[in-house]
Amino acid sequence: MLDGSRDLSSYSGRASIWKLSDHKICEYVDPIFEERKTCYDIKIENKNIRISPKTFYEIEKLSTDTLVIIERIDGITGNDKIKKKWLVRTSKLQNEYLSTLKNDSIVEASYYFTPSLKKNIFSDFLERSMTDNGRNLSLSGNIIIYPKKQKINFQSESTDQSKKNLENIEFLKSIVEKSYPSWNLAGFEKYDQIIIPYHIETKIGDDSSQASSMKFSFFKNDRKDLDKYPNRAIVKIKDKMLAAEAYNKAMEALDKKKLDKAIELFNKAFDLNNTNVDALYNAASISLDKKDMPTACTALKKLKDFEQVEGTKLFNELCSKN
């Protein structure tokens, strides 16, 4: 965030790929699936990139390979609510990655350097699993693409060696190994092999009330920024609607001067949705007004754990010696 606080939104731990032109921005949240994108028509206005009447990106820094922008939305003024984004030219990241490789003909794909799918080839597999009473599947391995031979090899490992699972794996293998025309291999033509590590999990709903899903993770963890904070507090949204309801009730209790009830409800709102740091700030503020330092410091400690700048500052000033 603009003040240095941790961004607690759902996608804060993920990198994304942006493609910019004079008139459009497209954000890709997954480097493999090209269809997973959000595009905006834009208008360049001096140092601003406007994407809607109420939203624009303020350009803070622009160099040959770096773009730093601040997201400005009408009505949002707090520096702990305003997002700041750092974008690095993809070719720079790719060149840095390629400089670490020893083999010129075989390359292991990374988040920043990978072929991508022009269409989702896995939908038939998920549909088959749902209609054929398929079981849950957990599968790891490599997708190996041979650009010069125009072929694909699907390698897999699974702890479940049941007949049903092996049939599902064989079906998935047949889909992937026939998918060569669906891959965008621009820039990879010179390599003999491109290795894409993967992990795939499917969850098949038992009835109409349970949705079936298929989750993917690709590559090895070569993003060093993900390893900076191994002990970070975990974002959990148990129930967004109940959290909002508790927050609104807390505000009503505060209006009626029912301070203890307001603190209780603000803490409940945070427990149900711990991205709602305003609930903690309110609980801390009320407790400080009441001179209830233990309750205030409990809230401030949570804000510190979630790397909120103002909360950390107050905790260090008021609670670190207690």
Image (spheres, grey):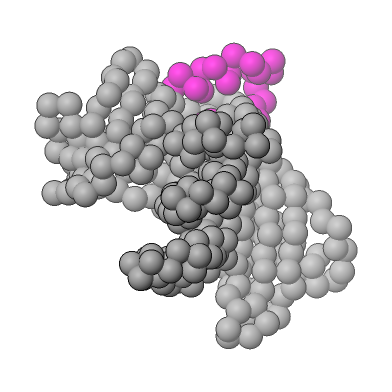
In the picture, measured across the screen, residue 249 lies left or right of residue 227, that is: left
The residue that appears at 65% across and 22% down in the rendered structure is: 105
In the picture, measured across the screen, residue 25 lies left or right of residue 163, that is: left
Q: Position of residue 27 (x, y in %)?
A: 37, 43
The residue that appears at 29% across and 19% down in the rendered structure is: 62
Q: Position of residue 133 (x, y in %)?
A: 70, 80
**Does residue 10 appear in this view?**
no
Q: Measured along the vertical axis of the image, is residue 65 above or below residue 35? A: above
Q: Nearer the viewer, residue 294 or 24?
A: 294
- Say how many tags the image has: 0
Residue 96 located within the stretch drawn in magenta: yes
Q: From which residue to which does the magenta span run?
A: 91-116
Q: Position of residue 231 (x, y in %)?
A: 68, 38
**Does residue 93 appear in this view?**
yes
Q: Nearer the viewer, residue 58 or 132?
A: 58
Q: Measured along the vertical axis of the image, is residue 6 above or below residue 285? A: above
Q: Position of residue 263 (x, y in %)?
A: 50, 61
Residue 169, image quadrant = bottom right
Q: Nearer the viewer, residue 220 or 61?
A: 61
> Which image quarter is the C terminus in?
top right
The residue that appears at 51% across and 49% down in the rendered structure is: 291
Residue 118 located within the stretch drawn in magenta: no
> Which image quarter is the N terminus in?
top left
The residue that appears at 60% across and 79% down in the rendered structure is: 210
In the picture, measured across the screen, residue 113 lies left or right of residue 21, that is: right
Q: Measured along the vertical axis of the image, is residue 186 above or below residue 126? A: above
